[in-house]
Image: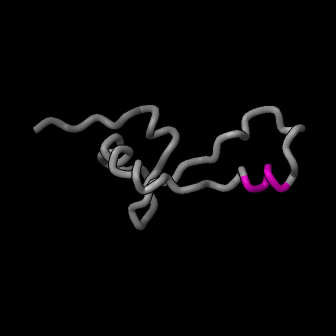
Amino acid sequence: MPKMKTHSGTKKRMWLTGSGHVRRGTAGLSHMMRGKSANRLRRLRKNSLISPTHEKMVKRLLPYGRA
């Protein structure tokens, strides 16, 4: 059976945690910072988990995971 291909866009944006969840960066941090409060910008720097409803779909796009 041939190797499965990893989705290029997904591998650049998401990764698997040790416990098998999918982690992603937070949106809204690329421009227009002056309109956002310092607290909001600090929160946006943290990574967040993908919703459990989308996990199965994303894991199909990342067949070999990414550490």
How many marks do you count on the picture?
Answer: 0
Q: Residue furthest front?
A: 53
Q: Position of residue 57 (x, y in %)?
A: 34, 44
Q: Residue at x 65, y 41 (%)?
A: 27
Occupied quadrant, residue 28: top right
- The correct choice, above or below, for 66 with respect to 34 in the image is below
Residue 14: say if magenta: no
Q: For the C terminus, give its image quadrant.
A: bottom left
The verdict on residue 41 being magenta is: yes
Determine the residue located farthest toward the left in the rendered image: 1
Scheme of colours in the image: one colour
In percent of width and height, residue 14 lies at 49, 46
The residue that appears at 41% across and 67% down in the rendered structure is 19
Span shown in magenta: 39-43
Q: Is residue 60 above or below residue 19?
A: above
- The quadrant of the image that shows the N terminus is top left
Residue 21 drawn above or below residue 61: below
Q: Position of residue 41 (x, y in %)?
A: 79, 49
Task: Choose between 40 and 13: the one closer to the eye.
Answer: 40
Residue under the image location 40 percent in, 52 percent down: 53
Main SS category, magenta section: helix
| Residue 1 horizontal side relative to residue 40, left or right | left
Q: Is residue 30 left or right of residue 24?
A: right
Residue 30: image location, x then y, percent: 73, 35
